[in-house]
């Protein structure tokens, strides 16, 4: 495994490996503090292409002024040990000067309209411009054939797919299933912000999503009622919900009567942690 910090070294190494039989590159962008969810992305990457590249970069552009940029967990040595064990080929660990040489304000930005301003975008203004901008820059530097993202960040995955399609990027965007703790809580670096008491409440987010899935699929509850019920349940369980919303799976619009492939998305705060999760719903 090679660890590179500079763009020149990244390009040289990718080029060198690629030139052997024009091998395919699978890319997993991360912010580090790797957990089982990230490792599932890397394992899937290894199945999809002979060359696996992982980036570790806590992207300041996607954090709001009052968010957790400074306290976001940074565990580089442990992360590298995990990646080595999975036979990762190249790990790209840039710093801010490498990713934003002109600073954040002067950086050319990528905006996927509408999708970036709803749901999490409404509660975290600028977040998805930060994500799309860094992912676009990383794609240009790595030039992967396949890029992998977790389905836990469903809106992020949808936005990146749209960006890749709108900008004609020659790569495939693959979503990988969420990895959960045994009690259902989706793995996330932010789970470590939970106190013991909040940790006991946290699986209630996925529990509520599962109940809403049953309400929609089995009891044929309408979307508006399901949203209000889900939101109330989260409050009763001790969460402060940002949103609880039933959407179409591809465009994340409010469903009409003919829409059968849906997703329920939720974001809720528990103390210092803001948790997000989602569940697929099939009405047929
Ligand atoms: O999902 C993440 O960890 C980040 O949003 C990403 C895709 C690595 C961009 O910084």
Image (tube, rainbow, N blue to C red):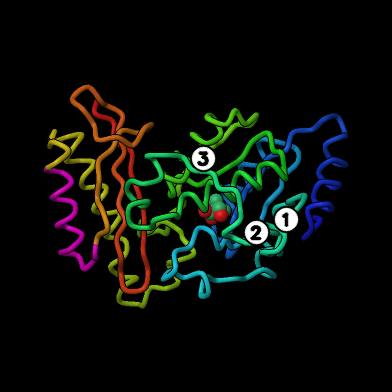
Secondary structure category for the residue under label 1? strand
Q: Position of residue 66 (x, y in %)?
A: 41, 71
Q: Mark 3 = which residue?
A: 160
Tell me the tag on residue 92. Answer: 1
Q: Which residue is mark 2?
A: 56
Disc 3 element: helix
Q: What residue do we see at 46% from left, 46% from top?
A: 156
Q: Position of residue 128 (x, y in %)?
A: 46, 50
Q: Earlier in the sequence, mark 3 or mark 2?
A: 2
The residue at 74%/58% (across/down) is: 84
Is residue 229 inside the magenta stretch? Answer: yes
Tell me: residue 168, above or below residue 88. above
Q: How many other residues sit within 10 Å of disc 3, few (<14), some (14-19) or many (≥20)? A: many
Proximity of marks 3 and 1: CB atoms separated by less than 8 Å: no
Ligand 1 within 8 Å, label 3 CB:
yes
Q: CA distance from mark 1 to mark 2?
A: 6 Å
Q: How many marks?
A: 3
**Of marks 3 and 1, which one's residue comes earlier in the chain?**
1
Name the dominant secondary structure of the magenta segment.
helix
Residue drawn where x is 17% and y is 38% of the image:
223
In primary-sequence order, the first of circles 1 and 2 is 2
For the residue pair 183 and 168, the one nearer the viewer reads as 168
Q: Name the quarter where the C terminus is drawn.
A: top left
Mark 3 or 2: the one toward you: 3
Q: Residues within 10 Å of mark 1 (few under 14, many from 20)?
A: many
Where residue 49 appears, as percent x and y from the top left, is 71, 36
In which image quadrant can residue 181 be found? bottom left
Which residues are drawn in magenta? 225-240
Q: Is residue 62 above or below residue 255?
A: below
Residue 235 in the image: above or below residue 229: below
């Amino acid at each position: 495994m090679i660890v590179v910090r500079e763009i020149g070294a990244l390009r040289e190494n990718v080029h060198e490996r690629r030139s052997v039989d024009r091998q395919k590159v699978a890319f997993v962008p991360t912010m580090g503090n790797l957990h089982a969810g990230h490792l599932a992305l890397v394992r899937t990457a290894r199945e999809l292409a002979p060359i696996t590249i992982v980036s570790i970069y806590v992207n300041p552009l996607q954090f709001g002024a009052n968010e957790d940029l400074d306290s976001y967990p940074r565990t580089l040595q442990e992360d590298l040990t995990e990646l080595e064990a999975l036979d990762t080929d190249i790990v790209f660990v840039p710093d801010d000067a490498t990713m934003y040489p002109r600073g954040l304000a002067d950086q050319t930005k990528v905006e996927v309209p509408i999708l970036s301003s709803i749901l999490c975008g409404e509660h975290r203004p600028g977040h998805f411009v930060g994500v799309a901008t860094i992912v676009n820059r990383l794609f240009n530097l790595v030039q992967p054939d396949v890029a992998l993202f977790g389905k836990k960040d469903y809106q992020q995955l949808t936005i990146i797919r749209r960006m890749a399609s709108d900008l004609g990027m020659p790569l495939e965007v693959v979503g990988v299933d969420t990895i959960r703790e045994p009690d259902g809580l989706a793995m996330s670096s932010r789970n470590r912000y939970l106190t013991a008491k909040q940790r006991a409440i946290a699986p209630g987010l996925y529990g509520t999503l599962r109940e809403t899935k049953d309400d929609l699929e089995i009891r044929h509850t309408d979307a508006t009622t399901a949203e209000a019920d889900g939101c109330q349940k989260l409050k009763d369980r001790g969460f402060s919900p940002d949103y609880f919303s039933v959407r179409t799976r591809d465009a994340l619009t409010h469903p009409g009567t003919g829409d059968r492939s849906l997703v329920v998305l939720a974001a809720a705060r528990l103390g210092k942690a803001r948790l997000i999760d989602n569940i697929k719903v099939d009405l047929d």
